[in-house]
Amino acid sequence: MNISLNWLKEFVRIEKTHEEVSNALTAIGLEVETVESYDPIKGGLRGLVLGEVKTCQKHPNADKLTCTRVDIGSEIVPIVCGAPNVAAGQKVIVATVGATLHPTSGEAFTIKKAKIRGEESQGMICAEDEIGLGTSHDGIMVLETTLPNGTPAAQYFEMTEDSVFVIGLTPNRIDAASHFGTARDLAAAWELDLCRHDLSAFKVDNQNRKIAIEVKNPEACVRYAGLTMTGVKVAPSPEWLQQRLKAIGLSPINNLVDATNYVLHELGQPLHAFDADKITGNKVIVRTLAHDTPFVTLDKQTRKLHANDLMICDANEKPMCIAGVFGGAESGVSASTNAIFLESACFSSTYVRRTSQFHGLKTDASFRFERGTDPNMPVFALKRAAMLIKQLAGGEISSEITDIYPNPVQPFEIEVKYKHIDRLIGKKLEKQTIKSILNRLEINILAESEESIKVSVPPYRVDVQREADVIEEILRIYGFAQVEIGSYLKSDYLAEFPEVDRFKIVRGLTEMLAGLGFSEMITNSLTKPSYSASLQMLGNERDVEIANKLSNDLGVMRQTLIFSGLEVLAYNINRRQKDLKLFEFGKTYQKTEGEGLEKYVEREKLAIFLTGNRQAETWQSRSEPLRFADMADAVSKVLAKMGIKDFEQQELDFEPFQYGLAWTNKKTEWAKIGLLKKTVTAQLDIKQEVFYAELDLETLLKRYNPTRTFTEIPKFPSVRRDLSLVLDKAVSYESLKKIAFQTEKNFLERINVFDVYEGDKVGEGKKSYSLSFVLQDLNATLTDQVIEKTMTKLMNAFETQAGAVIRK
């Protein structure tokens, strides 16, 4: 963003150098990236002065040259001149030795002392094209002036040098995206008076040209104001206006367009001028149009509109302008325009940002609307622009201002505690200092107590909506440099952080899984509707559809992480990377059913995929395929990392699984693992086995237990005993484990299954489990009698509760 120092001086009295202004702007958060000098004429006429020709004689050695002596104030110098119209007594422009001239055409050159045909010359008497003031080269410029000799030429031509601050404006500071906004901050920092335009002379001349306004989308158009002007004359802008615009990098167009651009950069309020004769039906309608409606913009390109593009239309609902972004080719101001409709509005930042991105259009207007303009500025800016246009193009204001503002934006009310101000700034400020800064920032104090103040923040400060934001504003104007650095540094905050730090836990799980040889993946939440249609438990009726889908393949939000993960597996397998261990933290999305439920459900999950071999084959070891137990081990380690122990394992009937297992607690499912059915993997043309695990991260976070208990290493040895049990196939290992720990609570440390057999030797419908039991007494060495008694108790429990036959 470019800000002119001379322009700033119209709003605040600045008597400091441009370096001091630059430093002040940076200190209050408007970082000046560079300061550029601007000259109305290239070179700024530096080194050129007014001179008076004292004598004029023919050159002795050249017929077309003249030898003159010119008084340049500090001295009288000889100059050889080739102009036919030079004469004694003339006031002229003299380029002194060392001056660099920038002619209208051609390269710049520097004046040096020289001898021309044997006669000394210490300067140059200039024609207008030689100093960039015009194109005439018929002779030297002869001036009519009483200014003394030696007066700088820039002073005679009333050319004022300007300094332009190039500010790297952050997105939150759109309130400063104008000369008035920047001056407002400077006035607050330096405790100066802020000058405002006096619009008391604004008046409506007649009611001859009223144009009606209808806003059909008040959500997208917060406020819309307009008036009509007649009898205007399109012409080039005056020199002062052209120079103002050129200083900040804009190209002048004509007086009407330049006036709207001028007010935009002056007040930060975008405006648009329509040719009133091109508004069919003398009515403006603000609305959206059908998708793919064609529209020709100012750059002569035909664009297909999006259904959410807010448009300014005529009575026939024919589009004339993309609201807040770009004008139309058919409704804009032209050389023949003599009546205009002037628009000043506040459009929704969301709508303008979406439209700007969709069409790839970035304009000065969209830059401001995207970030949020002042809803209280449109009428003020409209009056300012109308008065300026009358000054520049003549004409009359031929209608009252129509201002449609159905839901006025209210100021933000915030309570600020003094102790929080002192704590965050790191220095105790006097209450009067705090209130003075807030008043200078136009933040009104509504109520005050010993502990706090209640303030009202104007709507144009879209970035100040919390207590911490107000404190930041106080510090910004008070000055970071005025806060002394203590002997040690610390930071503070107002936000409350949860005891369970989700990001820290997820990072810990990520590091653990990576240590186990897994790789993290991140997949798209948008997916194909055909995936959910392939599983009855999902179904398309539960899909969350995308309103503005880019393609059918990305038409819905995913209901499960299975298919997005399988796409990654398929991509790698097709490139001969078949041994894969992957995981992803991602979200699933579903519509809900039934009364009392929310319309949508969004859940965060941890998905783990295993396929291929554990490791590549080497001369030391053969490759072994990944198994169900490998997945179970990974899930167990995740639960252990979360500090979760009180869970049960149950066989799982889950539609995508050929077989599976669930980790549950009190009917709450925490995790499930299984082998994916071939009908599922075949959708991605995956032919090898894929094991899948899914953990409900939100549920696990609620049960997260960071406490770790450490015990002393036992001083007494443990004992292992094995049992072989013949059971019905329906009896699970988990049930045996539960029986064992319920039966023996003193000495049983752990239980493990090391062999499973099914076959003719145990009978039909039967299976054999070989179990190991580790017994431990922390206070004494276990005796044979205690061991035998414990094992007998376990065997009796298995026989009576599980119908087991002990193989001896």
Image (tube, rainbow, N blue to C red):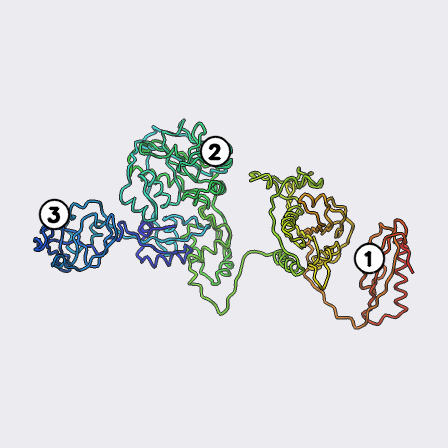
Q: Where is residue 154 in the image (x, y as percent from the top left)?
A: 22, 52
SS for tag 2?
A: strand
Q: Quadrant of residue 31?
A: bottom left
> What residue do we see at 20% from left, 54% from top?
48
Residue depicted at 64% across the width and 47% down the height: 567
Pointer 1 with pointer 3, Cβ within 8 A:
no
Estimate the spatial distance between the alpha carbons at disc 2 and disc 1, rounded to whole Å: 69 Å
Residue 222, how many percent across, how many down?
47, 39
**Which residue is nearer to you in this view: 216 or 97?**
97
Judge the density around disc 2: few (<14), some (14-19), many (≥20) Cα neighbours within 10 Å.
many
Judge by depth and name the residue closer to the eye, 508 or 446. Answer: 508
Front residue (pair 215, 35)? 35
Task: Classify mark 3: helix, strand or loop.
Answer: loop
* Side (left or right) of 193 relative to 484: left
Mark 3 to mark 2: distance in Å?
Answer: 66 Å
Q: Is residue 377 left or right of residue 574?
A: left
Q: Position of residue 565 (x, y in %)?
A: 65, 49
Residue at which label 2 appears: 287
Residues under numbered marks 2 and 1 in contact, where contact means CB atoms less than 8 Å apart: no
